[in-house]
Structures are given as structure tokens and as C-alpha cells.
Amino acid sequence: MSKKLLVAFDFDHTIINGNSDTIVREMLHAKPPELKPSDSWTEYMQTIFNLLHKQGIKESTYLDVITKIPATSGMIDFLSFLNQPEIEVIIISDSNSIFIKMWLEATFEEESIVSHVYTNEAYFDSSDMLNIAMHHDPPQDWCEMCPKNLCKGFVLAKHLKQRLDEGIEFNNVAYVGDGRNDFCPCTKLQVKDYIFPRKGYYLAKVLDNSIAKPNFTNEVKAVVNVWETAFDIQQHLSEVL
């Protein structure tokens, strides 16, 4: 069985117009600690969550803050447009499962537009402290392009293989992102596929060669279309569906 399209999204600065981690960090009364060179961002965020817990921040406060983060322009309409039988939508994000779940449920209520979310697993413990774990356990060491907690290219390739094993093959794949860790999955796409980097952000700059690509990266084969609003992406994909 074939489906027309798989659309894989980043979350921060792509679906939402902001970074969920740094927005939550702003709740700290004191100046936040510096990120240690030896720590990953995921480990750093656990330190932030520990400090917020000591400050008395509970799940309800996180919910209030996360659900107030606006979507990027046109994104809610675009995600609703993608809610079609022949289209599958997934999220591959360096955020965490709690933040993404909170935002999606508040935005779309019972509508299950996103079929899979691949991210760092998070949960609230009995004391209402937010805990986070790396997506890869043990941490990945095979991809120099990605942080140790999550190789997005590996996750995308694994999802495509899993769906193929289940009898689902996609005619095209589209990847929508903005940041440094969104480059790796772009190298996994074929000439028939599409990359949508957000204008003005790292991914768009590295793809148009305005900044240097890492010397260990693979060639990007897919068609690149820069977007400012999600309506731009919808217009491009409407032409191929």
C-alpha cells in the first residue's frame, strides 16, 4: 500500500514560534546556570527542571506556559490541511514529550493529526518535578552531525523502514525544520523529496551555502523550498498532491 506523503516536522521554531525549553527557563527567578561543555542540552534542561521544582513550579504552571506559545504563522491551518488519509505527519524534536503533548492537545483537542512523536521522553514524578531522558539510550555515538540524545536522520530512516515493513510506502517525504540538528535528516531524503527550511534560520543558511556546511555531511539531494509562513509550504505541497 502506498501513501502520497510523509511530512516530518521539527517542533521548536517550526511548529511553534519559539523555543519551548528557553521559554520555560525564563520562569527561573535567578539567572540560569551556564551550559557546561561536558553536558548535553538534555542534561542541562534537567538541571533547569530541578531548579524550577525547587522554586515551586508544578505541572499546571508548565501547562499554562507551554499552551500560550503561539504557532508559527499559518501552521495550525497547514496541519489541519495535512489531516488526510493519504498523508502521514510525524514530529522529530529535541524538545520533550510533555511539552509537545501539552501543546498539541491544547491546540487540536481530540484531533490526532500527528501519528508519531519522536523526542526525549519526559514525565512528572510524584513530587511534581519534571524529568527528562535522552531519546537514545544509551546516547548515540554514530552521527557527528547530531547531539548524543537524538539523531534525527536515524529516526527518520528508521520510521520509513518500519512503515515499509508494515506495507506502507510513501511516494514523497517532506521535512520541515529550522535548526542545526535538522540538517542530518535532510541528507536522508531522495531527489523526489522536499526540504522546507525556515527563512533566516540555520538550516536555510547552510542549505543555500551562505554559511559553511560541516565537512562530514552527506550530499543533500531533495528539492529545497524556503518558507516564511506555513502557507508557503502548503502551497508547494498542494501542487504535488
Image (tube, rainbow, N blue to C red):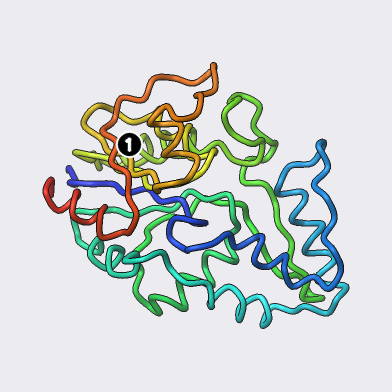
Number of other residues with Cα within 10 Å of mark 1, as a class: few under 14, some 14 to 19, many 20 or more:
few
Q: Is residue 122 left or right of residue 192?
A: right
Query: Residue 46: where, in percent of width, then height?
Result: 77, 56
Give the camera-side residue of 210 and 76.
Answer: 210
Can you say whether 18 is above or below 187 in the image?
Answer: below
In the rendered image, the residue lying farthest to the top is 215
Give the camera-side residue of 167 and 215.
Answer: 215
Q: Which residue is mark 1?
A: 165
Quadrant holding the N terminus: top left
Q: Quadrant of residue 144?
A: top right
Secondary structure at badge 1 equals helix
Query: Residue 81: where, in percent of width, then height?
Result: 22, 64
Query: Residue 62: where, in percent of width, then height?
Result: 66, 75
Which residue is at 59% across, 33% downward? 146
Give the camera-side residue of 8 and 239.
Answer: 239
Q: Quadrant of residue 45?
A: bottom right
Can you say whether 195 is above or below 9 in the image?
Answer: above
Which residue is at 22% across, 39% downward? 172
Query: Residue 208: where, in percent of width, then height?
Result: 38, 31
Q: Is residue 18 left or right of residue 241?
A: right
Q: Is residue 46 left or right of residue 107?
A: right
What type is the residue that disc 1 sits on? Asp
Which residue is at 77% across, 76% downward? 128
